[in-house]
Image (cartoon, rainbow, N blue to C red):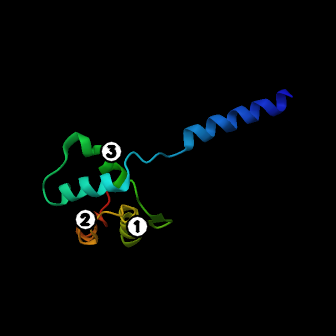
Amino acid sequence: MKSIMLPAFFLCIASLLSSPAMAADACEVVLCMYGKATGNGGGKECSSAERSFFNIVKKNKHGFLPSHTADARKAFLLECQSADTAIIGQIINKFGRIRS
């Protein structure tokens, strides 16, 4: 019985530690990134939203893929149903392909 309990315990702990959590929802990210794109940064309130946006990175064995990253970031921002696509386009044009 002990031989089953120990791996089960470690499996539960590993699942808790490795589960990534998005700090901000898509609409919050759109709002904060639009402010950043227009020069009106949101300050400390937007740091988790900006981090969520810039944590979306696509790579392969050769390194950073800017166009794939921009597509993934755009797909995430489009999850906000109320966001204007022109605003999302402006955000992606300015920050979609950069690596921070």
The dot on residue 57 is: none
Q: Is mark 2 on a helix, strand or loop?
A: helix
Q: Residue at x 39, y 45 (%)?
A: 23
Sequence-first tag of 3 and 2:
3
Q: Residue at x 69, y 38 (%)?
A: 11
Return the residue at label 3. 48
Q: Specify the amino acid type for callout 2.
A: Ile
Q: What element carries label 1?
A: helix
Return the residue at label 2. 91
Q: What element carries label 3?
A: helix
Return the residue at label 1. 75
Above or below: residue 22 compared with residue 39: above
Q: Measured from the top left, where is residue 31 in percent x and y?
A: 25, 55
Above or below: residue 58 compared with residue 53: below
Q: Residue at x 71, y 32 (%)?
A: 9
Q: Residue at x 31, y 65 (%)?
A: 96
Above or below: residue 24 compared with residue 89: above
Q: Specify the amino acid type for callout 1.
A: Ala
Sequence-first tag of 1 and 3:
3
Sequence-first tag of 2 and 1:
1
Above or below: residue 44 compared with residue 28: above
Rendered-image quadrant of the C terminus: bottom left
Q: Residues within 10 Å of mark 3 (few under 14, many from 20)?
A: some
Q: Measured from the top left, where is residue 56 in percent x and y?
A: 40, 58
Q: From the viewer's side, name the closer residue of 99 and 76.
A: 76
Whole-angstrom CA distance, mark 2 to mark 1, is 12 Å
Marks 1 and 3 in Cβ contact (< 8 Å): no
Q: Specify the amino acid type for callout 3.
A: Ser
Rendered-image quadrant of the N terminus: top right
Q: Measured from the top left, where is residue 17 in percent x and y?
A: 56, 38
